[in-house]
Amino acid sequence: MGAHVSYLGKNDLQLGKKESVQDTAVVLGSMFDGIAFRGFEQKTVEELAQYSNVPVWNGLTNEWHPTQMLADFLTIKEHFGTYEGKTVTFIGDGRNNVAHSLLVTSAILGVNVHIVSPKSLQPDEEVQKMALSISKTSGSEVVVTDNIQEGIYSSDVIYTDVWCSMGEEDQLEKRFELLKDYQVNQHLINLTGKNNTLFLHCLPAIHDLNTEMGQLCFEKFGVTCMEVTDDVFKSDYSKVFQQAENRMHTIKALLAITCGELF
């Protein structure tokens, strides 16, 4: 697209340590035409946006993952021709940034959304209230449940994510016990009652033993996969790699529309 990129990692910045986020935002805004933030605290990206005076893109925080949603709904539209009237079901750790973003984005777009998680891992109450409030205007059906069969039935899209988010690896045993019944396998896909269900995953996925995490899970639990089985991950109805590619296309569009006239 003709842009020039500078990468600043966690060891290159003093965000909130020796320099306030506000001061950093002013400095970066004077040097760059846009800032892509991928980190932990939502308040950090919001302060960058408030004080930098340039476009700021949220590439991921603990609470939200909006750019992932652009890729996800493009993938759904490419597969079905539309996302209107469809039901998207997330199963697994419903407190994470992907589940939160899926819940609210679906409500905005008028897409029916189900979050299927154990009660202790269901989305934040404030996020649920936000989605329900938006759904009153859009007509989206919002369901949050720990009942797998009820939550999965009639789903057009089954979506899952790793069971331990970044920084929570020490809770692997606890998460496995909570979520082992929520694994996306062929039996669960069959519970949708549909023959054209789409499978999505924002990656990386623990679906075989070809990773260190996969090997660790095998040693600890004697399993060859975690949140999704290998046969589902590699099935014809799995569009995870198309979904991954679409992150590039949608982010290019996001950059183009927020940076003004490029050509």
Image: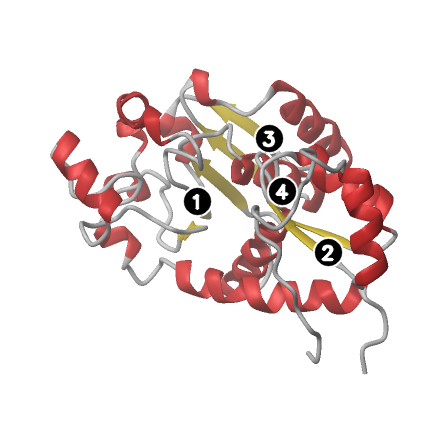
Q: What residue type is labelled 4?
A: Ser
How far is disc 2 from disc 3 in space, using C-alphas?
A: 33 Å
N-terminal-most mark, 2 or 1: 2
Can you give x and y, in whole percent of width and height, for residue 217 in the image? 20, 37
Name the residue carrying label 1.
Answer: 159
N-terminal-most mark, 3 or 1: 3
User: Does the residue at mark 2 contact the one at mark 1 (Cβ under 8 Å)?
Assistant: no
User: Does the residue at mark 4 contact the one at mark 2 (Cβ under 8 Å)?
Assistant: no
Asked whether 194 or 33 is in front, the reply is 33
How far is disc 4 from disc 3 in space, using C-alphas?
A: 9 Å
Of the two numbered discs 2 and 1 in the rendering, the one whose residue sits closer to the viewer: 2
Tell me the SS state at disc 3: strand
| Residue drawn where x is 71% and y is 37% of the image | 44
Tell me the SS state at disc 4: helix
How far is disc 4 from disc 2 in space, using C-alphas?
A: 26 Å
| Residue drawn where x is 43% and y is 30% of the image | 93
User: Quadrant where the C terminus lies?
Assistant: bottom right
N-terminal-most mark, 1 or 4: 4
Name the residue carrying label 4.
Answer: 106
Q: What residue type is labelled 2?
A: Ile
Name the residue carrying label 2.
Answer: 35
> In the displayed structure, does residue 161 sit left or right of residue 111?
left
